[in-house]
Image: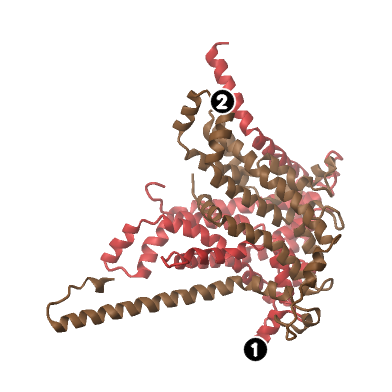
Amino acid sequence: MQEENIPVLPSQEGAEAAARTKKRAATVKIVRLAVDYLFLIALAAVFLFPFFVMICLSILPDKDIYRQVLFTSSGVINFGTYTKILSGGSKYLSYLGNTLIVAAITTVGIPLVSSLCAYGFAKMEFAGKEVVFGIVLATMMIPAVISLVPLYTLYARFGWLDTLFPMWVPSLFGGGATNIFLMRQFMRGIPNDMIKAAQLDGANSFVIYFRLMLPLCLPILLYVAVQSFLGAWNDFMTPFTYLSVGSKHITLALGVYYDYTNSSQTLANEAMAAGVIMTLPCAVIFFCFQKYLIDGVAVTGMKD
Amino acid sequence: MTSSTKKKLRRNIEGYLYVLPVILGVLIFTAFPVIYAFVCSFFETPLKPIGEGFDHFVGLGNYFKSFSDAYYSRKFFTSLGVTFLYAATYIPISLVLSFLLAVFLNKQVKGMRFFRVLYYLPVLLPAVCTGMLWNRITDPYYGVITKALQNIGINWSWFELPQTSMVSFEFISLFTLGGNMILWLAQLKNVPKSLYESATLDGAGKFRQLVSITVPICTPMILYNVIMSIIGVMQTYSQVLTLTGSKGSGLEDSLLFYVFNIYDNRVTHFGYACALSFILFAIIGALTAVVMKTSKWVYYTEEG
């Protein structure tokens, strides 16, 4: 950068020297850029390695599985693993169905309910608001396992064991403090003048929430929705705690663990295909919403 | 009743209606189980539906059991040791590496956003898929990676030896560095460009700028990440379970994380499992308090 600012001297020699340094600076810049990209690509290869291995193994013919290779020498691409998993009446399809039910309710429920509560905390005035919000925030510090295990006793009383209820009912109560905190932070950034203007036009608080706040909060709503979907899709602990082996309500995360983790039960190619199918929706959703996700995470780290 | 108090009452009721779901959620899914678990921790009782009473009162017996009874104390201290070892090694390594990754990815190079997305991708891989994948590819007899490493002369036993289990687990966990990286990147955006410019004018090199400008400005995020990592790492469970499958907590309990102990005891010794949960809660609380108390190194900028 600095070299470029050297004033060109009037003499022939000076001009040549300046041109030489300029050229050298340009070369250095290109080399640096090339090194950067080389490094970036090398790191990308490392981070994508698990995906690569999973996909390679999933299309390997059965006879190559025990040869400890990634690619077959026969040139056959085996999609049979996928059709086997997704064929009618397979256990995997039942896992998928259960997971879709839970994920659908959670993805709609959490953003809706948590935005309602966040609106209350961000824009309404009521006695004890700060205390209630403080208590809600404090629950973030409580380790999940401390409530996960004793809730079993409650769900047993409700008759919720071996059902999908423990997986989705909590989402109708806002799905935890983190979402409400994020939404509240976002809503506090919306000017109160807009709300006052709406009030003057005769809008009540719910109309303001529904017609004004929700559209303005779309980025954070999407962020929470995507996070809720991923959370529901990947949740292992909840089904593991409340569903017994062989239950017909087993979700994908638990089913993949029971059926495919141990090498004694299934071939690796089928297990990897099961993993690829489970990962695919997460990857697609991430690529579609990566802007909201990455920007949303930026909000997560901000303090009050 | 005057109209102003009536109006005030109405406003309070309205506000509480909005936050009612989260209040109920906290009461049912957090406060209730935590209090119930606390009561149960004083009883010797198996897991059973709520309302069927407790067996017999043992006072602080469940809490002392971890220290007095030979069998329980061995498990307790082993699990504590494993968890602390993981926390003490993995938290610093992952924070430093993800920070360096973020600094590198903060360069203004074309296509950087794409690389960030790629590096974040492994975070989205469902934990159960990561577990299954590595379980298969590190298998001593059929694993692709085991074979590939042998071919280049490395005989790494992964989870077949107690000595290598922890290092292997930490290595696999490092693939999710992208999660912290995104948080750092958000913080790096907040560093005022003018600081670097004046530092360059003063002749400070890139490394000096990193140590004297970037790191101090990132200290609030360091504090946040350290606390969140402690809370997360102390609860490690499903990552290990899905990875080791039938071997559970690893050979000779080399991966017996604290929560394994809670889960192993929860059915027959529910009271003891509750006591263990509260000991964990106390440990997390104490560690967080220590980090907060010693957080004089955190530098808050004016707008912070």
Task: Name the amino acid, label 1.
Answer: Gly
Image coordinates of residue B221 in percent, x first then y, are 48, 55
Image coordinates of residue A155 in percent, x first then y, are 81, 43
Say few, some or many: other residues with alpha carbon within 10 Å of mark 1 (under 14 / 14 to 19 / 20 or more). few
> For residue A204, which numbered disc appears in the image?
2
Query: From this viewpoint, is residue B41 visible?
Result: no
In the picture as drawn, the residue positioned furthest to the top comes out as B1
Query: Would residue A90 be found to the left or right of residue B216 on screen?
Result: right
Say few, some or many: other residues with alpha carbon within 10 Å of mark 2 (under 14 / 14 to 19 / 20 or more). few
Q: Nearer the viewer, residue A258 or B156?
A: A258
Q: Nearer the viewer, residue A52 or B37?
A: A52
Task: Name the amino acid, label 2.
Answer: Asn
- Asked where in the image residue B51 lies, by quadrant, the reply is top right
Chain letter for the red colouring in the rendering: B
Q: Residue at x 60, y 39 (%)?
A: A115
- Please give the residue where the numbered disc 1 appears in the rendered image: B153
Image coordinates of residue B83 in percent, x first then y, are 66, 63
Q: Nearer the viewer, residue B301 or B80?
A: B301
Q: Gap between marks 1 and 2, in whole Å?
A: 73 Å
Q: Nearer the viewer, mark 1 or mark 2?
A: 2
Q: Judge whether A37 appears above or below B239 on screen.
A: below
Visual hue assigned to chain A: brown
Image coordinates of residue B102 in percent, x first then y, are 48, 64
Query: Would residue A260 be found to the left or right of residue A8 on screen?
Result: right
Q: Residue at x 54, y 42 (%)?
A: A217
Q: Residue at x 85, y 40 (%)?
A: B53
Query: From this viewpoint, is residue B36 visible?
Result: yes
Q: Secondary structure at mark 2?
A: loop
- Asked where in the image residue A263 lies, by quadrant, the reply is bottom right
Q: Secondary structure at mark 1?
A: loop
